[in-house]
Image: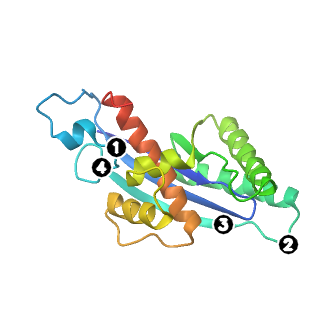
């Protein structure tokens, strides 16, 4: 068995959430047969458990980039933080939340700037970035695309088998992004796209 590490990022120019999860994987994979449990064949929820496919939280948190600093200074600090996470966690992939224009156009533009920094930094590090819209993350983690932040948080904690996730909501959001990537990989592996 090998382990795959995924770095989940909840981007922002004020606060950035990050989470590294590790997934145990078998060398040879096969699609589940008709005799496999229904949950394994058809579920769209991230599942915890022992053995193959077990997901473990390595670390999660959030970094405040400084409200009083200029946008350029905050983005520069984001590059430094991302480089340190990549070095410390040695991820194989990066999962990134796509921009959502629900709050305001200005917020969406700022999130887009942070996303650009993540994309460029990951690319320079040789990492592939998988991007997911918020509704897909909610659907993959909580089972419903309109799930509340609380429901997503509860399901993420349950999927990881931990008591809770320390830090602000940005850390939990980053965990959900990483878990979405885990489930997307499983869906492709088991033909449940």
Q: CA distance from mark 4 to mark 3?
A: 27 Å
Q: Counting other residues with Cα less than 10 Å from the Cα at mark 2, is it few (<14), some (14-19), or many (20 or more)?
A: few
Give the secondary structure at mark 3.
Answer: strand
Q: CA distance from mark 4 to mark 1?
A: 16 Å
Q: Residue furthest left?
A: 35
Residue 115 visible in the snapshot: yes
Vertical comparison of 162 with 18: above or below: below
Vertical comparison of 96 with 187: above or below: below
Residue for badge 1: 44
The tag on residue 68 is 2
At 56% from the left edge and 49% from the top edge, which residue is drawn?
134
Q: Nearer the viewer, residue 18 or 191?
A: 191
Q: Counting other residues with Cα less than 10 Å from the Cα at mark 1, is it few (<14), some (14-19), or many (20 or more)?
A: many
Q: How is the image coloured?
A: rainbow
The tag on residue 63 is 3
**Where does residue 9 sit, x and y in percent of width and height?**
59, 52
Give the secondary structure at mark 2.
Answer: loop
**Where is residue 133, by image quadrant?**
top right
Residue for badge 4: 54
Q: Is residue 135 left or right of residue 122?
A: left
């Amino acid at each position: 068995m090998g382990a795959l590490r995924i770095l989940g990022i909840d981007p922002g120019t004020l606060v950035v959430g990050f989470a590294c999860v590790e997934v145990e994987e078998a060398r040879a994979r096969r699609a589940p047969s008709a005799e496999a449990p229904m949950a394994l064949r058809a579920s769209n929820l991230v599942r915890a458990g022992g053995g193959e496919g077990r997901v473990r939280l390595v670390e999660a948190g959030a970094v405040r980039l400084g409200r009083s600093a200029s946008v350029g200074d905050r983005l520069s600090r984001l590059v430094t933080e991302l480089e340190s996470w990549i070095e410390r966690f040695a991820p194989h992939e990066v999962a990134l939340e796509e921009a959502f224009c629900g709050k305001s156009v200005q917020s969406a533009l700022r999130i887009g700037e942070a996303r650009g920094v993540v994309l460029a930094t990951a690319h320079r590090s040789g990492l592939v970035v998988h991007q997911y819209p918020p509704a897909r993350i909610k659907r993959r983690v909580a089972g419903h695309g309109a799930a509340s932040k609380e429901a997503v948080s509860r399901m993420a904690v349950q999927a990881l088998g931990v008591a809770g996730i320390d830090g602000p909501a940005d850390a939990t959001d980053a965990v959900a992004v990483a878990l979405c990537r885990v489930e997307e990989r499983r869906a492709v592996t088991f033909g449940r796209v």
